[in-house]
Every structure is written in structure tokens, then in C-alpha cells.
Image: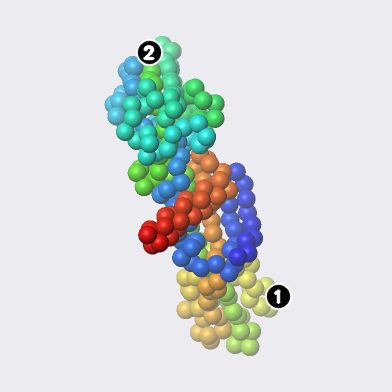
Amino acid sequence: MKINVLYRDEKILKIMIEDVRLEYINSLRRIMIAEVPTMAIEDVLVLDNTSVLYDEIIAHRLGLIPLTTVYDRYGSPEGCADKELASSPECAVRLYLDVEAGENGYRIVYSGDLKSEDPDVRPTSDRIPIAVLGRGQRLALEAYARLGRGKEHAKWSPVTVAAFKYKPIININEDLCVLCGKCVEVCPRKVLELKEDKIVVLNVLDCNLCKSCEEACEFDAIKISWNENTLAFTLESTGALKPEQIIVESTNILEKKLNTLLQFLGD
């Protein structure tokens, strides 16, 4: 297996993987979405709410705020799912919020107003709106976050995008091409360009294999195919974990599953 990093930042990772089976990469993708654990708010105790929103709506919004995640000090999702989080510091971290709008105007409550007892577990962004308070209104609450998995609820999924595609192959027969430019016009991703009396491919990875260019060409000068042994993988994190952490954790989970299967078959 050969891996080439195409793009990387704090939340997005794009890689090219050669000599790999699709089934293996798809298994990792499904694990990334559904089984890599992250922190999310599960229980909310509303102390005071004079806003126009119901307590349940606020609790739902809090649950969908991505939180940075650590593993080394909190129990597993399976071990903590049925525990009272408020009295189980080994399973949950407490966050609290107390915001009041003044008499002179309104106040927007943001995720940055949430204060965490663990500085390593906090909202990934301070600018996620929770509620709008009118004059004199107040919102005070306690929230408890625990580890969970995306298969239990989407709020625990660490990714917003986990997708792959075959590496496109664009073959242009210059002997048949009459430079009519129809393939350039119909391409929805602007992959092709008419340049210096020939059709050139700007970025082959932008091709989504729709074959619109192939269908538009009346002279069969362009053919679209793909390399089944090379996959372009795009991973976008919610910010709960770094993309590299998500990949490592998903491979560890897959390895454990395979070991369990081998043990079962051996018995």
C-alpha cells in the first residue's frame, strides 16, 4: 500500500491510496462514521430559562455542538451509557452556562459561553449560536458530556465527510479530436480546458466520473475510466479529533474486530 497526502489542514485530509482493496477502505470509512468515539453533551439540567425556546430545544442544540475529545480519562461508551452522568466523574465532564441579557438590549448565547471543568473538552468553535435572549432574559444550565459512537447518535460521529472515489483516467485521442470544445463546455467540474490548440486536463482528481464530456463528443475522441487499485479519500473532521487521529483509531477498531472474528472462527 502506498499513501500520498494531497492536502492537509486541522480538519481536512485528502490522500491518495494505491494498491488497496476497496472493501478495506470502505470498512475504515464506515468505522470512522459510526464507531470512532467522541465527546458530546448527553444530559442537560436547565436551572433557569426565560428565553423563548423550550428546554428540549436548547438541550438538542447543545448536544449537536462538537466537543474536543480525549480518551485517557473517561470511561468507554459502553461502560458509561447507563450511568448517572452527574455523579460519575469517571464517565463525564461537566459544562455550565449562565448568561443574562441586560435591560438595554438582546444577547446571543454562543458555544463560547459554555465553560468546561476539563480544559481539554470544550466546543470546537466559540461561534455556534445556541439561543437569543431578549431584555432581562436569562439562560443558566449544567450539561454533562460523555463518550459515544455515531451508530448511537449522529452527534457522536467525528466526521462531516468521509468519502472516496476511484482515481479518474481521462484519455483524449488527439487524432480524433477536432477541438470543437463541447467537452469543455459540458464538464460540470471544469476539469478540461482548450489551450494551445489541444484539450488539456487541469486536475484529474476534480473529475466526478459523470462522463458528460464523453457523451457530448461526437467523434469518440475522449474516454473516461478509472483505476480500481487507486482511491482518492477525503476526510473532514468536526474538530472533535484530528483527521490523523480518526484514521488511527478506526484502524485500531478494525483490527480488534478482525481479531475477535479470528478468535471466534478458531473456537
The amino acid beneath tag 2 is: Gly
Vertical placement of residue 147 versus 216, above or below: above
Judged by depth in the image, the label closer to the viewer, 2 or 1, is 2
How dense is the environment of label 2, judged by Cα within 10 Å: few (below 14), some, or many (20 and up)?
Answer: some
Q: At 43% from the left edge and 13% from the top edge, which residue is drawn?
A: 102
Residue 29 is at least partly visible in this image: no
Looking at the rendered structure, the secondary structure element under dot 2 is loop
Write the residue at 49% across / 24% down: 116
Q: Could you tell me residue 256's position as x and y percent?
A: 46, 52
Q: Quadrant of the N terminus?
A: bottom right
Q: At 42% from the left edge and 17% from the top edge, which residue is drawn?
A: 98
What's the mark number on residue 128?
A: none
Q: Is the residue under label 1 in contact with that under label 2 (CB below 8 Å)?
A: no
- Which residue reaches farthest right? 196
Q: Nearer the viewer, residue 52 or 97?
A: 97
- Mark 2 highlights which residue? 136
Residue 234 x/y as whole percent: 53, 56
In the image, residue 15 sits, relative to residue 132, either above or below, namely below
Give amino acid for label 1.
Answer: Glu
Residue 123 in picture, x, y percent from top left: 49, 32
Residue at 46% of width from left, 61% of height from top? 26
Q: Is residue 38 above or below residue 16?
A: above
Look at the numbered disc 1 and give the secondary structure of its residue. Answer: loop
Mark 1 crowd level (few <14, some 14–19, many ≥20, 10 Å Cα): few
Q: CA distance from mark 2 to mark 1?
A: 68 Å
Q: Nearer the viewer, residue 62 or 100?
A: 62
Q: Nearer the viewer, residue 4 or 104?
A: 4
Q: Point out the residue furthest to the front here.
A: 267
Instruction: Look at mark 1 in the image and give the residue it sits on.
Output: 196
